[in-house]
Amino acid sequence: MMTRIVRTAYLGLLVLATGCDGWTTPSGPPASLDAELRQSLSRWGTVPIGSTPAQPPALVDLGQALMFDKVLSGNRDIACATCHNPVTNAGDGLALAIGTGGSGLGPSRTLGPDRQFIPRNAPTLLNTGLGAPYLFWDGRVANLGFGGGGGGAFQTPAGNQLPAGLPTLLAVQAMFPVMNRGEMRGVPGDHDRFGNPNELAEFGDCTPPPRSPPSRPRRSPGPTRPSIAICSTTMRR
Ligand code: HEC
């Protein structure tokens, strides 16, 4: 009887042992969190940032000065860096950006009276200068030459009104926020933060350039189309 009990117990243990086959004991925390992160990132083809071409220091200084200067805006109250603030990762920490008329910075920035949210989120600008095929959430400012395909040509809502000779996609893009009424230009009747009339806001808007040429040639040249600065205000951002 005793022998049978012992035999059954052994059999039970054997079954348990077989059932546990494949069970791995947790081996504790990863040897290095960095190594684990690196392995995870490598699955997405992420590579370290390579060396970038040296930039003329004077241009870097100019770019920095413009980025932080509210004088670029019609109401002299908002700079690029208001929405692309280094403190909030070159974004603004808000779901929807707040343009001219607003006050404060980062997530606590508030709308000015009678102003609307910019209908889009301000993306971070980190690493944007490393090269991108397109910018903006809908990709409407695109580098047709990205990857060697288009000989440095850009596609933007400004069509053929884009000034020639802009060297990079970022330079092309920088033309737009200052012309956008909600972001930086303001609306007719605005006064800047020093109490002066906002002259930039007084320029009228025009319709964007046609997508395709008119079917019949025009008899007269027609009114001169205002500069890109004015036309692009109609471009939704
Ligand atoms: C009122 C806030 C605001 C201001 C001021 C502003 N931006 Fe932006 N920026 C945005 C928003 C919102 C977008 C996304 C717009 C879209 O996709 O339609 C954007 C997009 C961009 C992008 C494209 C990023 C990407 O990855 O697609 C660049 C570059 C940029 N802004 C640079 C600038 C520069 C330069 C200035 C100043 C001349 C400026 N911004 C001023 C809110 C702002």
Image (cartoon, rainbow, N blue to C red):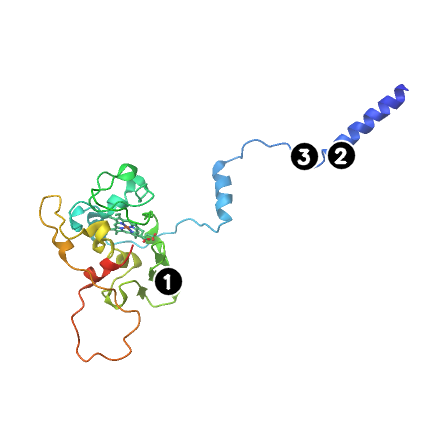
Choose the circle earlier in sequence order: 2 or 3. 2
Q: Is residue 154 above or below residue 49?
A: below
The answer to which image quadrant residue 131 occupies is bottom left
Amino acid type, residue under disc 3 in the picture: Trp
Amino acid type, residue under disc 2 in the picture: Thr
- The extreme right residue here reads 1
* Local SS, label 1: helix
Choose the circle earlier in sequence order: 2 or 1. 2
Judge by depth and name the residue closer to the eye, 168 or 113.
Answer: 113
* Local SS, label 3: loop
Q: Is residue 219 above or below residue 132?
A: below
The residue sitting at 35% across, 49% down in the picture is 127
The residue sitting at 34% across, 52% down in the picture is 128
Mark 3 Cβ and ligand 1 under 8 Å apart: no
- The extreme left residue here reads 196
Amino acid type, residue under disc 1 in the picture: Phe
**Residue 208's x, y, as percent?**
25, 64
The residue beneath circle 1 is 146
The residue beneath circle 3 is 23
The residue sitting at 28% across, 48% down in the picture is 118
The residue beneath circle 2 is 18
**Residue 177's x, y, as percent?**
24, 53
Question: For the residues marked 2 and 1, what is the alpha-carbon distance in whole angstroms?
Answer: 58 Å
* Local SS, label 2: helix
Mark 2 Cβ and ligand 1 under 8 Å apart: no
Question: For the residues marked 2 and 3, what is the alpha-carbon distance in whole angstroms?
Answer: 10 Å
Q: Is residue 166 above or below residue 178?
A: below
Left or right: 149 as drawn, with respect to 24: left
The answer to which image quadrant residue 160 occupies is bottom left
